Image: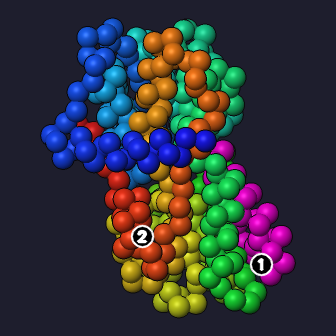
Amino acid sequence: MRRNKCAAILAAAVLCTSLGGCTSGTSTAQQHTVALVAKSTETEFWLSVFAGAEAAATEYNLKLTIVGPETEEDYETQNQMVEDAVAAGAEAIVFSAIDYENNADAINAAAQAGARIVAIDSNVASDAVSTYIGTDNYAAGQMAAQAALDRMDGALKVGIVNYDISSANGQERERGATDLFLESGRAEVVAVINTLAEAGHAQADTAVMLEAYPEINVLLALNEPTSVGAARAVEELGLSDQVFLVGFDSNVATVDGLQEGSVDALVVQNPYAMGYLGVESAYKLLAGQSGGLEQIVDTSTQIVDRSNLFSMDSQKALFAFEQRLE
């Protein structure tokens, strides 16, 4: 799958940073234009994606633009951003779909206009996608469920905090988790909510669920904003000792929660690699080097809990490179 390359990307980035930057032999080549259209521009996850994308753009001498809507539910703005990118001359689109179905027409239109398409993080229902780079979301959902099964005894009463119901990766994570819980024979999913991918909304909706279902002793929150919100709800309701929370991704709030007890485990993805490999793949498509591209590239995922929080591997995964848009 290319997990070793993902690790190498991170190591190379550390070296480049320590040396004050790297240059590439492609600097005299034709400068292609690539647009990255993200789900959001605010979360730690996406800032790490952007850092990886910018590193690849520098290495391959690409003109890169990065845009995304204000909320992770606004697929219509995403569609307009794709159209605008093509009109501005983007030769390739690196895209993460908010809505698997409703983003498809915009991507198909971009491809018909001549743009090459790379999907990262969340796929889209389009045959125009040349390669998908991201987490195996079904397996990641199973990883989250297994984290609870391995660390808790007795019967598990599970609540799941998911985000937009039209997002392919969230639904795959939920399906992976529920399938494994069912197979275990000692877990029951008693409630599932879909909330906005925003910490405040997720906190309020999680609190309502926990009050309605006091038997819940395991919570799964399936992306960064829902994990932050769920952790705040658990802490404010005084349930840190009663509810085992497995979240997704790295955020200062959830890492603090790991140390303080409101969070028990995190499924940590590799957003830096998604950004880097997404832009690198766009370059290869435009440079006529697409022969070696894999249809699906599974970036690495790992579990971080209090037992391994301060290991070198966990620290590298939790505190990836970030940069803010100008």
Question: Which region is colored magenta?
Answer: 168-192
Q: Quadrant of residue 252?
A: bottom left
Q: Amino acid at mark 2?
A: Thr
* Residue drawn 37% across the image and 39% down it: 52
Nearer-the-camera pick, 304 or 100: 304
* Residue drawn 36% across the image and 73% down it: 310
| Residue with the mark numbered 1 | 187
Q: Quadrant of residue 68?
A: top left
Measured as percent of width and height from the top left, residue 58 is found at 28, 27
* Quadrant position of the C terminus in the picture: top left
The answer to whether residue 45 is left or right of residue 132 is left
Nearer-the-camera pick, 162 or 310: 310
Residue 36 magenta: no
Q: Is residue 44 above or below residue 124?
A: below
Nearer-the-camera pick, 266 or 168: 266
Nearer-the-camera pick, 14 or 213: 14
* Quadrant position of the N terminus in the picture: top right
Residue 178 magenta: yes
Q: Amino acid at mark 1?
A: Ala
Q: Quadrant of residue 32?
A: top left
Q: Is residue 219 above or below residue 322?
A: below
Measured as percent of width and height from the top left, residue 243 is found at 58, 84
Most frequent secondary structure within the magenta stretch: helix
Measured as percent of width and height from the top left, residue 72 is found at 50, 46
Residue at the extreme left: 20
| Residue with the mark numbered 2 | 254
Which is nearer the N-term, disc 1 or disc 2? 1
Measured as percent of width and height from the top left, residue 230 is found at 51, 71
